[in-house]
Amino acid sequence: MSLLAVSSLTKRYRRGGKTVIAVDDVSFHIEPGETLALAGPSGSGKSTIARLVLRLIEPDAGAIEFESDDFLALRGATLRARRARLQMVFQDPLAAFNPRATVARVLEDPLRIHGIASRTERPRRIAALLERVGLAADLAPRAIHEISGGQRQRVAIARAIATRPSLIVLDEAVSALDVSVRGQILDLLLDLQRKERIAYLFISHDLGVVRAVAHRVILLDAGRIAESGDARAVIDAPQSAIGKALVAAAPRLKGTTQDAS
Amino acid sequence: MSPIRRFLRTPEAVAGAILLAALIAMALIAPLLFPGDPQAIAGPALLPPFQDWSLPLGTDRLGRDVLAELFHGARTSLAVGLAAAAAALAIGSVVGTLAGFAGGVVDEVLMRITDAFQTVPSFLLALAFVSVVGPSLGIVVIAIALGTWPGPARIARAEVLSIRERDYVASARAIGMHPLEIAFREVLPNALPPGLAMSSVIVAAAILTEAALSFLGLGDPNRVTWGGMIAEGRAVLRTAPFLSIIPGIALVLTVLGVYLAGEGIVETTAVRRGLS
């Protein structure tokens, strides 16, 4: 049984009288502990799929099955409770936090909302979470805008794993980071996956990163699946036109044999 | 540079701060300097200012000490102005946040109610409300807030409409936060600053409205108000104009002070936002 099974997902937007199909009949599945990458050019529907899977927006058609339940049928408190199992990390780690928040408050929210730790227990849990993502526990009282971009993304990951989810949607989660920090964050994500069997829906336009971390990849073009399969096989020998164009646009991939870590 | 020093750099802000500080000082020391009832008779009636130094600003038609009344009036003006502005901002930002965040039918209903309040002239609304419910300080505050909350509500809604699309609201939903908690804990505090920038104008308008209500005899009869003093003096405007002029000047300086200080604060925060 798949962890997440998405079938015939469709989302249309109406803009100035014209209907734009952002996601067109997309189906895929993710197994526990697996990384599935969604790659494609800007406007191909990657982020829309991420938001649909998280129920941040509602689809026009299709079905989403998560942990053997009809995820689209959940409402209100039931849906909010289930959100603990399905988390998200955003691209811009500054925009993803309330500008007034402190690190401790950001990490306390999921613990409080899902009743994971009592009030007295929370400071210890927050310290443990910070340590888990490679940050010092004394970072807790700091304001979000005081810490560096890499630290912020680690806090975002700590928030995502606070509720012990089985799936994390990573929407361009490393795209805004500089190269050295990006490597560290990817290592952290892979380490979490190995130890806690978290599955990732990894959204990226960077095929180099996708090839390094994803097991399987889906290439999207204008809201449709253009090509899918084993990440390395697809990126090393793309069959679709968009796949070839994407690989050609990432010159450092040509002829190299980058190793997945 | 610290915000206080930046605030003190603009002369208008300094003038406003001094006026406002004087007003607050007057309000605070009124019961110490003039203990007892300021409406009690203190000397001969219609004593002109600067004649008797135990009654520096003279007395009114009934022989009440004008200076004592002026000091106690500052308490009323300040209390009503601040309370009404706080109430208007509170109602406005809650309504605006709910409308902007909920959207759809809730938004439509709340904004039509806001429209309804905004189309009625706020002074008429206050006048009607006080006439019906009866004059007391609390009622006057509510009456003024009733006419002024639509402004902050519209500003808060516009701000919320942009904030609710931000990633941090999406992440609050993704961690399963209740929509009301998102609205009031994540969105509202970040939607407040533009409304707060308006607060000086609201305070100034509230002080003027209170004075106008008192002038028409709809103020709290148990309290001295500047508007009431002007109304009192009107009967003897030709023989003792100082009775209207003195509280009138106090009113002008207060509104000016509040407004200038408010401008200074807006300026200060604007600079800080520009730098960050």
Image (cartoon, coloured by chain):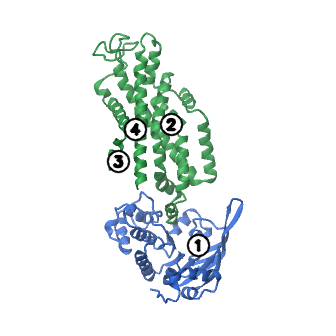
Mark 2 or mark 4: which is in front? 4
Mark 2 = which residue?
Answer: B145
Mark 3 = which residue?
Answer: B3
- Judging from the image, mark 4 belongs to the subunit labelled B
The image shows residue A145, relative to residue B76, as above or below, that is below
- Judging from the image, mark 2 belongs to the subunit labelled B
Q: Are marks 4 and 3 in contact (CB under 8 Å)?
A: no
Count residues near mark 1 (Cα–Cα under 10 Å), then give few for <14, some for 14-19, many for 20+.
many
- Residue B190: % across, % down: 47, 53
Q: Name the N-terminal-most of marks 2 and 4.
A: 2
* Nearer the observer, A116 or A195: A195
- Asked if badges 4 and 3 are on one and the same chain, I answer yes
The color chain B is rendered in: green
Mark 1 = which residue?
Answer: A46
Q: Are marks 3 and 1 in contact (CB under 8 Å)?
A: no
Mark 4 = which residue?
Answer: B261
